[in-house]
Image (tube, helix red, strand yellow):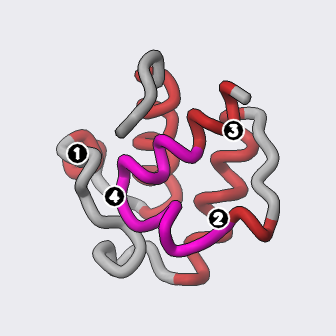
Amino acid sequence: MIPEGTNEIEKTIRAVLSDVLSLSPERVAAFTPDTGLFGSLPELDSMAVAGVLTELEDRLGIVIEDDEVDGEMLETFGALTTFAATKILN
């Protein structure tokens, strides 16, 4: 479940996915919390993960530690949004 008050975070994540993965804004706008990411989007391969996470750090002003990166946080759009929101709100 995505925490309340995450609209700006969600917008930023959508922009990062669009920019880094070269996905159309329309495609990214259609993502729901259940939309699969890693393993579901061919554009999000292991090399692209680093770019997405680095860009999220820059745009959201967070630090993502290596031991925090796992398949679960990248499994769905909702999981990634919840992870980012938790990093910002804590």
Q: Name the residue under label 1.
A: 32
Foreground disc of the pair 2, 4: 2
Task: Provide the residue span drawn in magenta.
Answer: 69-83
Q: How far apart are marks 4 and 1 (CA)?
A: 15 Å
Image coordinates for residue 56, horizontal then vertical, percent? 64, 46
Q: Mark 4 points at which residue?
A: 23
Image coordinates for residue 13, horizontal then vertical, percent? 48, 42
Foreground disc of the pair 1, 3: 3
Question: Who is closer to the viewer here, 49 or 71?
Answer: 71
Q: Distance between the residues labelled 3 and 4?
A: 25 Å
Q: In this view, does 9 lie to the left or right of 1?
A: right
Q: Name the residue under label 3.
A: 87
Q: How far apart are marks 3 and 2 (CA)?
A: 18 Å
Q: Mark 2 points at which residue?
A: 51
Q: Is residue 34 left or right of residue 18?
A: left
Specify few, some or many for label 4: CA neighbours under 10 Å numbering under 14, 14-19, or 20 or more: some
Pointers 2 and 4 in contact (C-beta within 8 Å):
no
